[in-house]
């Protein structure tokens, strides 16, 4: 039928959507989420129909995506008809029924996700089905490859290309800020892309951003790596695996993460990596809670790496507490710089040296651990970090004390003496976020009492930094309410962790930062 | 933060959605699908955030639902902040992990669906998880009750209230158009609500609409039932179980139907039914393919009925071919009238008498089958149908030959003589829809050769009716391509049903009409 085009002048964030009235939908035989073919002159496209009760019956409303694709000006006459559902939707339905998908089915789905032919409802159903049914090895491989081929990729014209990745989950993990300069100082290429925090107090991109810009274009990244062998940039706008970016948007509210392997490996392949060290923090404070899970995940990574032509080694790392002491963008950047200068907390230094030497070993460096220690102790790593900061547009002379942290701060003190028996990383994350992290770069917390350490009565358990008094107050109140650090002289003193139903049930936290 | 309100002047179809720019979302700490609290003066509401790349950073765009709820005029200053996720979303996440939901979890979900606090992405994930994990008896009961209590209900001040329902799936099933007048003529109350076709050539509401209006208000329905004991109306706009209407919108593109029991039973309870006959067509042409599935479903219906205070009997009916001969709104209404007048196809008459007598038996009528036969044979059923047509605003003197059918028609003839060995109801549905049904009321097909019947060479297999020549041509081409009716003298002549990969794979059809 013929309808008059009405420009709605707003974007949907990607999908091509067109609005018709209920009456017009009935006449077209169109139901919500059906596809309609819109033809104006010699141009045509398929859009997803949105049905609105009170829209004029003789009009079709188009969002900016459709307007742009059809080059519309408004008030044109459009020929509109019911279009068939995309083939990929039938593949999604097959997955809902528990069927295995073939490579071509997966290619069709990923292609239609990137081209915005599938609605977020349909993508949500697909991801839910994957989350429940799991992925076969062949499906994981096909998804990884489809996500790479539908995105951009980088070619540095060098080999090997090293990379490091953490599956995420423990707060305060600023290891990449040490591994990149150590590896680059040894003459190897390590173009590191990172994410921003979604559920944590800081992602690597948030931390590095307190030192220099991280939102670089592909060409700027090439320049930085050409000059310094390394970089520490935000990967979010590079479109390395645009399907994954769209999947993550849908996964986040649902608290599911069925595509961990394809998501990580597609981005590593797109950046041209040949050797990848994967950190799997394992423990009560991490995304992966048990060693058994971690071993399964690690062997999946190694196997899938082989299929994709990537040499992968995984490190299962201690994940019962935060890494180092600081949580929050600027506080963490300070701690990373201090560690590069020879100070800093010993667990951070140890982890950075271990992961760097794992990469060195993978590319045949002799005495890899000694090499990593020598690079950090000689100041070469710090020098390389300053080169990278400068190449990305920051101040290479930056000192830890130059970084501004929240001017409002307060300490949480212990009511009794004792040894730290356990602590809740989830609660620490909530407190750091209440203080303003990651949005307010200077906000966060410093943990003064880690597992097994002795605390005297009135000793400081943690310090809270905030940029605004209201946030400091909120974070302090939360710290008092949650009591994230439990002291005891003997474990038997605190055998009951929680009682039900007296206290509200804790929600299982969901971490998607990677 | 403070943002200026911009009215977008279109509806989203229900959800309260607000649009902010990516930059503004970052400042708010908001990700796609997060909730934001919008305060204007002394009014506040929670909306779902949509992030648009190119939206002005200092503005918040609101759809009409939000505009109405906050009584906005545009250009006000709104206080906007990140709001917590609704509790029900954590219940959905629990279901995604395979956990059982408690009654209060389900109440929270259904309430938030009806109040539009959950996005369609989140509802899609919930329904997908239900479809894969299945529902426990307690979950089914809780869902049914929650769907009733969040909707409107009718009270006719009478008892018993009888009802009849088909779980759907065979085309041409116009039984309700006979059962309602038979039961009402016997003096029992039977307020029948029906759906329109989604995937079939006609729903009961589409059929009845060729005789009289079906889109009645609750008060109008009460009047009709007061006068005639029965009605045949469209249930879609009555808001008897609004959660179900929203669930069906999401289920339709996904091809899943996890809520069959709660969906049907909540609507029966809302209409005040006390005794319900449920028809479960079983066979290759129906939604339920095997007797085993049908028996399981039937016993679930009976059990769940007990829990909800409904007396239920199920009839497993023959579902290997269409019921009667006609498919398409007007063609089917003609056939129903003809059967009420003593003619019509024997399978339709038999099924209508069986289901009516099942209802009579449930309420203690003696010789129930004889009673049903007597009512139809004496013309009382036809007279009652005319009363109902008149009460709903139609012409009570209507004759089958008065109903206009498509002026363009053609016959599909057999190339050889033989007996009908099998026929594809899915293909017949596709042909009827290609002819224009259900949108064009006069379009459809008449099947001249049913299972086991003899056809001579050049004998008519089916007749196609259309309102437009182009549709007639399309339906004829499809009929020739699909060959939905297979003739044979001996079964061995046609042992191979299909070959793979030579022919394109048939998509598993999905039926949601109920």
Image: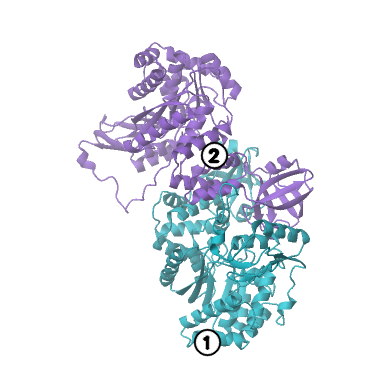
Chain colours: A purple, B cyan
- Pick the front one: A363 or B79: A363
- Disc 2 to disc 1, how far (Cα)? 72 Å
As drawn, which residue projects farthest toward the top? A378
Question: According to the image, label 2 marks what residue?
Answer: B28
Q: Position of residue A421 (x, y in %)?
A: 26, 36
Report the side of B47 relative to B293 (left or right).
right
Confirm whether circles 2 and 1 share one chain: yes
How many numbered marks does the figure carry? 2
Q: Are marks 2 and 1 in contact (CB under 8 Å)?
A: no
The image quarter containing residue B235 is bottom right
Report the side of A399 relative to B72 (left or right).
left
**What chain does badge 2 belong to?**
B
Question: Considering only vertical position in the picture, is A206 above or below A17?
Answer: above
Q: Is residue A119 visible?
A: no
User: Tag 2's secondary structure?
Assistant: helix
Q: Position of residue A483 (x, y in %)?
A: 33, 40
Tell me what residue is drawn at x 45 percent, y 14 percent: A185
| Mark carried by residue B501 | none
Question: Considering only vertical position in the picture, is A410 above or below A24?
Answer: above
Q: Earlier in the sequence, mark 2 or mark 1?
A: 2
Q: Position of residue B425 (x, y in %)?
A: 59, 63
User: Tag 1's secondary structure?
Assistant: helix
Question: According to the image, label 1 marks what residue?
Answer: B370
**What chain does badge 1 belong to?**
B
Tell me what residue is drawn at x 37 percent, y 37 percent: A288
Q: Is residue A104 visible?
A: yes
| Quadrant for the N terminus of chain B in the image | top right
Question: Considering only vertical position in the picture, is B250 above or below B57?
Answer: below
The image quarter containing residue A165 is top left
Question: Considering only vertical position in the picture, is B48 above or below B232?
Answer: above
| Quadrant for the C terminus of chain B in the image | bottom right
Classed neighbour count for the residue bearing mark 2: other residues with Cα under 10 Å, few (<14), some (14–19), many (≥20)? some
């Amino acid at each position: 039928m013929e309808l008059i085009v009405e420009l709605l002048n707003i974007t949907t964030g990607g999908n091509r959507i067109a609005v018709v009235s209920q009456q017009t939908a009935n006449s077209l035989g169109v139901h919500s989420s059906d596809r309609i073919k819109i033809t104006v002159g010699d141009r045509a496209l398929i859009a997803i129909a949105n049905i609105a009760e009170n829209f004029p019956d003789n009009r079709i409303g188009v969002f900016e995506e459709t307007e742009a694709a059809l080059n519309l000006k408004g008030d044109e006459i459009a020929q509109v008809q019911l279009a068939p559902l995309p083939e990929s939707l039938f593949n999604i339905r097959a997955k809902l029924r528990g069927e295995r998908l073939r490579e071509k089915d997966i290619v069709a789905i990923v292609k239609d996700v990137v081209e915005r032919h599938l609605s977020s409802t349909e993508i949500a159903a697909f991801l839910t089905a994957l989350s429940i049914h799991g992925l076969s090895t062949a499906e994981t491989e096909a998804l990884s490859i489809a996500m790479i081929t539908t995105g951009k990729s980088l070619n540095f014209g060098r080999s090997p290309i090293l990379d490091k990745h953490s599956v995420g989950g423990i707060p305060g993990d600023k290891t990449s800020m040490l591994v990149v300069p150590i590896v680059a100082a040894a003459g190897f290429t390590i173009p590191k892309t990172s994410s921003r925090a979604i559920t944590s107090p800081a992602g690597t991109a948030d931390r590095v951003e307190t030192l220099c810009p991280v939102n670089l274009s592909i060409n700027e990244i090439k320049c930085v790596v050409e000059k310094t062998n390394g970089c520490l940039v935000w990967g979010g706008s590079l479109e390395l695996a645009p399907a994954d970016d769209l999947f993550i948007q849908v996964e986040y509210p649902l608290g599911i993460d069925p595509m961990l392997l394809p998501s990580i490996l597609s981005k590593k392949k797109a950046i041209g990596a040949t050797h990848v060290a994967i950190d799997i923090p394992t423990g009560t404070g991490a995304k992966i809670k048990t060693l058994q899970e971690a071993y399964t995940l690690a062997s999946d990574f190694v196997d899938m790496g082989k299929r994709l032509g990537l040499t992968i080694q995984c490190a299962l790392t201690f994940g019962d507490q935060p890494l180092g002491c600081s949580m929050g963008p600027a506080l963490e950047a300070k701690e990373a710089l201090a560690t590069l200068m020879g100070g800093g907390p010993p667990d951070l230094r140890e982890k950075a040296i271990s992961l760097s030497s794992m990469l060195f070993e993978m590319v045949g460096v002799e005495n890899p651990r000694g090499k990593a220690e020598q690079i950090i102790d000689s100041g070469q790593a710090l020098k390389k970090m300053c080169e990278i900061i400068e190449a990305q547009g920051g101040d290479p002379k930056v000192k830890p004390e130059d970084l501004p942290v929240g001017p409002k701060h307060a300490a949480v003190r212990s009511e009794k003496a004792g040894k730290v028996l356990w602590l809740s990383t989830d609660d620490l994350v909530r407190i750091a976020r209440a203080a303003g992290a990651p949005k307010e770069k200077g906000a966060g917390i410093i943990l003064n009492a880690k597992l097994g350490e002795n605390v005297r009565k009135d000793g400081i358990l943690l310090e809270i930094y905030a940029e605004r008094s209201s946030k400091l107050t909120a974070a302090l109140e939360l710290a008092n309410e949650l009591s994230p650090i439990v002291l005891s002289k003997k474990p038997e003193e605190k055998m009951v962790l929680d009682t039900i139903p007296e206290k509200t049930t804790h929600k299982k936290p969901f971490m998607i930062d990677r």
